[in-house]
Amino acid sequence: MTPWPSDYREQFWALYPRKVEKKTAMEKLDQVRKSENVEFDKVINGLKRYILWLKHPTEWRPEAKHAATWLNRECWNDELPVAQVTIGTTDQMEIEAAVKMFARIGIWSRYAGPEPGLTGCRASPDLLAKYGFRADGRKLDATTTKVG
């Protein structure tokens, strides 16, 4: 097993997105290191995946867990769908995610292709209606909006 770097605490804390309860988090990180069952790279790579997952551009994510909770639950082992969050590496995003974002913030993502009302739009009229829009991208009135 590769030894942990001498500045492992600083490296972990610099990356962790929620800077609360540092003392408790550092005590738990020390326990993880002393257990000698986990390599530091595995913890850091799991943390990087977690950060990517938290920063998903179109889907709601909860606030980051406290670091001690993340460590206690061995979340570095979580299998998060990070391939779906790296939109910068693909030229298309899932169409329903684009429609959800459009409904939430009123902006159509360029990664979703042509916007509603334009030729080539991938969002079906039913999908648009599910989120309160007509096929041309205008909002449905409240009485005709489908609940989904």
Image: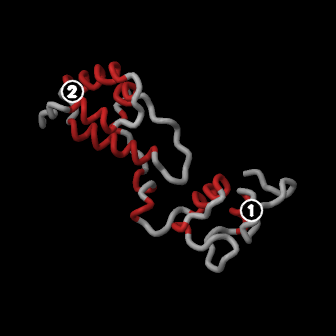
- Label 2: few (<14), some (14–19) or many (≥20) C-alpha neighbours in 10 Å: some
Tell me the quarter of the picture where residue 119 sits: bottom right
What is the count of numbered marks? 2
Q: Position of residue 44 (x, y in %)?
A: 27, 40
- At 30% across and 22% down in the image, what residue appears? 28
- At 32% across and 39% down in the image, what residue appears? 15
Tell me the quarter of the picture where residue 95 sits: bottom right
Tell me how far mark 1 sits from mark 2, CA to CA.
Answer: 52 Å
- At 28% across and 37% down in the image, what residue appears? 43
Q: Amino acid at mark 2?
A: Arg
Q: Secondary structure at mark 1?
A: loop
145 vs 18, left or right, is right
Q: Position of residue 92 (x, y in %)?
A: 49, 67
Q: Position of residue 88 (x, y in %)?
A: 42, 62
Q: Which residue is mark 1?
A: 133
N-term mark: 1 or 2? 2
145 vs 93, left or right, is right
Q: Which residue is mark 2?
A: 33
Q: Position of residue 83 (x, y in %)?
A: 40, 56
Q: Amino acid at mark 1?
A: Phe
Q: Secondary structure at mark 2?
A: helix
